[in-house]
Amino acid sequence: MARNGTAGVDVMLALRTGTATEHQQLEDSLDLLDPALDAARLGHVLDRMHGFWVTAEAGLDDWAAADPDTATALDWPARRRAHLFAADLAALGRAPEGDAPALDPVVDTATALGRLYVLEGSTLGGQFIDAHLATLPTLAGAARLHAFSPYGERTGAMWAAFRRVVRDRLVPGPDADTAVSAARRTFHGLAAWCTDVEQPASHPAVPSSSPPGGVPA
Ligand code: HEM
């Protein structure tokens, strides 16, 4: 159940506001906008992301078999990214360590859409992360990465298509509450899985701002 319930609230807005604290905490602890981010820490973060996406995608595959209509409406296969994190690791000269977290099973479509909200929303911040990585002298000469911002110029269109399906499938009320809870648990699962890549608390986090071409809820 969501902290405040979603009755009468647009479900995308409920997802955003219901996970804003979790998003900020994760953004701060990953600290990917660190001007001193180097290939070693970036590779470590990518490895954690890879393991997380492997588990998350397995759960979503189980759900897609149970609700193929919604999975098709979302174009679920086109949204997979575990292989992109593996490719980015390879571009940094690393192989995935191969470990992955346990996550809650994806028991229904509301849970799937809540989990997907976190995975898909990360492509919005991903544009900002990509733009930052391109400026880092510590990564000069490194190959361009693809997993943070996998859709390129189609980011807005992919997000808009995701929003349409969410609003079509989840009316405000119990299902939307379930989605918000699932999104929050997904953020918690990722944060718990990433504790060993956190920056020390003493490190000054770079304040966040909107990525190029910010996308509406
Ligand atoms: C240092 C890392 C991160 C930064 C700097 C960052 C930054 C941002 C920014 C600026 C937005 C707003 C985009 C817009 O409205 O146009 C955003 C959206 C979002 N990000 Fe992140 N992000 C980071 C990491 C992540 C991660 C790791 C996840 C989850 C795996 C995530 C999930 C989301 C979600 C779900 C949204 C959509 C919010 C909404 O509009 O409903 N972010 N991010």
Image (cartoon, helix red, strand yellow):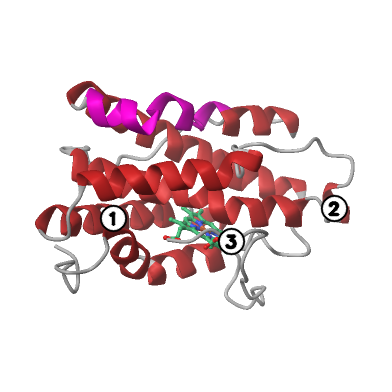
- In percent of width and height, residue 45 lies at 59, 47
Looking at marks 2 and 3 on the same chain, the residue that comes earlier in the sequence is marked by: 2
Q: Mark 3 CB in 8 Å range of ligand 1? A: yes
Label 1: which secondary element = helix
Closer to the camera in the image, 104 or 80: 80
Distance, label 3 to label 1, CA atoms, is 25 Å
Q: Which residue is mark 1?
A: 185
Cβ–Cβ below 8 Å for labels 3 and 1? no
- Residue at image x 33%, y 30%? 73
Q: Indicate which disc residue 138 carries.
A: 2
Mark 2 nearby-residue class (10 Å; few <14, some 14–19, many ≥20): some
Q: Which residues are magenta?
A: 68-83
Residue 105 located within the stretch drawn in magenta: no
Residue 78 located within the stretch drawn in magenta: yes
Identity, as a three-letter code, of the amino acid under mark 1: Arg
Q: Which residue is mark 3?
A: 214
- In percent of width and height, residue 145 lies at 71, 38
Q: Indicate which disc residue 139 carries.
A: none
Identity, as a three-letter code, of the amino acid under mark 2: Thr
Main secondary structure found in the magenta portion: helix
Mark 1 nearby-residue class (10 Å; few <14, some 14–19, many ≥20): many
Rendered-image quadrant of the C terminus: bottom left
Looking at marks 1 and 2 on the same chain, the residue that comes earlier in the sequence is marked by: 2
